[in-house]
Image (spheres, grey):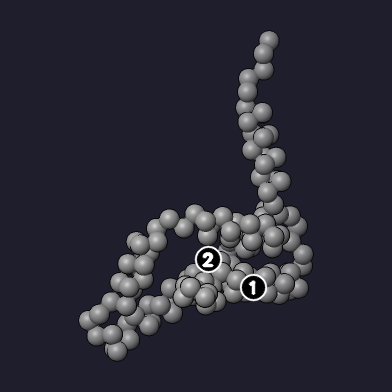
Amino acid sequence: MLNTDGSFSFTEEVLAQVDAFLAEYEQVQGPLTDALERGLVVSYALGAMLCDLELVWEALCSAPIFGQQNPRALWEECVRRNADRSAERDEIAAELVRHGWVHVEAEEEETTADVGGSAPAEA
């Protein structure tokens, strides 16, 4: 979580939690049938995690210890200073593929099929 440069990231922990959720989900519900279903379940799990995090954060921010201060302001300033996170996004996209949650080949085939299928036939 904590990097040598002082930065930190919870990406690995989040991915591990989703992997654990998928394993438990498939144990109870049975195997997921295809990449789309897997992607939808992963997306829903991440959304549920985000909702939970928001609730925890809201509860923390409303704690009397902060008084009139807004503890989210520090985070918002950090987001403004680090707006371009494309490198991190690319690394996470590669992790999604590595975890088997999305398949690049299927996306490329669909894109190619859409482009090729949309051209009008010549007479």
Res 60 quadrant in image: bottom left
Amino acid type assigned to the residue bearing label 2 in the image = Gly
Question: From the image, which quarter does the N terminus lie in?
Answer: bottom right
Res 74 quadrant in image: bottom left
Amino acid type assigned to the residue bearing label 1 in the image = Ala
Give the mark nearer the N terminus: 1 vs 2. 1
Q: Secondary structure at mark 2?
A: helix
* Image marks 1 and 2: residues in contact by CB distance under 8 Å: no
Classed neighbour count for the residue bearing mark 1: other residues with Cα under 10 Å, few (<14), some (14–19), many (≥20): few
Tag on residue 16? 1
For the image, the number of numbered tags is 2
Q: Viewed as shown, does residue 43 lie left or right of 75? A: right
Residue 39 visible, this orientation: no
Tag on residue 47? 2
Percent x, y of residue 96: 64, 59
Question: From the image, which quarter does the C terminus lie in?
Answer: top right
